[in-house]
Amino acid sequence: MKMINKILIIITLLSLSINTQALMERTLVTTATYESYVACVAAKEDIAFDNVYLLMHNNRNKVNSEGDQIPLSFNPRFDTELLQHYHLIYELTKDERMVDCDMFASIIYDSLKEEFDVCDMGEYSPMGKKYEDVVLSLLK
């Protein structure tokens, strides 16, 4: 009987671990997408990347409603990619090309969903002009 209880406990712990990992991956995909959107908006408006980075860094260090830290704060890869996204959009707008930040964020979202194998997440939900105005007010 003790052996069965131990096996059940191990199975339960493994299940919780897998669910936690899946939740972190979904949070990471969502957060990285929104950060890329913010970088896009900033680059279009010629706002320095330092402002974007500080805003993202401060938000990452806050805790969400469950008391967990946003997982991107532990992964420097996303800071590098965020800077690359910023420079890409900046160069495109410098050449006077039109850039749709919602379309850009949608591409990031879809690629991260595929990378982290969380394809069961819903479709990207466009943020629109209202969110862009909020982002600009935070960055200025």
Image (cartoon, rainbow, N blue to C red):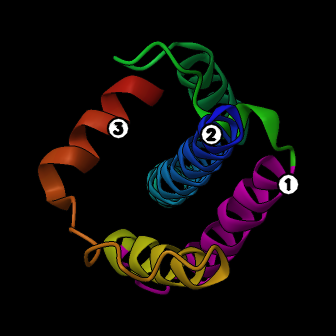
At horizontal 61% and vertical 50% (from top left) the residue drawn is: 11
Looking at the rendered structure, the kind of residue marked 2 is Leu
Residue matched to label 1: 77
**Near-viewer residue (20 or 111):** 20
Report the magenta residues as a range: 77-100
Q: Quadrant of residue 70?
A: top right
Q: Nearer the viewer, mark 2 or mark 3?
A: 2
The spot of residue 132 in percent (x, y) is: 27, 49
Gap in Å between the C-alphas at discs 1 and 3?
23 Å
Q: How many marks?
A: 3
Above or below 126: residue 98: below
Q: Residues within 10 Å of mark 2 (few under 14, many from 20)?
A: few
Taking the image as shown, residue 21 lies to the left or right of residue 113, namely right
At horizontal 73% and vertical 65% (from top left) the residue drawn is: 87
Q: Quadrant of residue 10?
A: top right
Tell me if residue 119 is in the magenta stretch.
Answer: no
**Near-viewer residue (34 or 112):** 112
Residue matched to label 2: 13
Tell me if residue 80 is in the magenta stretch.
Answer: yes
Q: Secondary structure at mark 3?
A: helix
Q: Is residue 67 visible?
A: yes
Residue matched to label 3: 135
Looking at the rendered structure, the kind of residue marked 3 is Val
The spot of residue 135 in percent (x, y) is: 35, 38
At horizontal 23% and vertical 41% (from top left) the residue drawn is: 133
Q: List the single residue furthest toward the front.
A: 1
The spot of residue 117 in percent (x, y) is: 58, 80
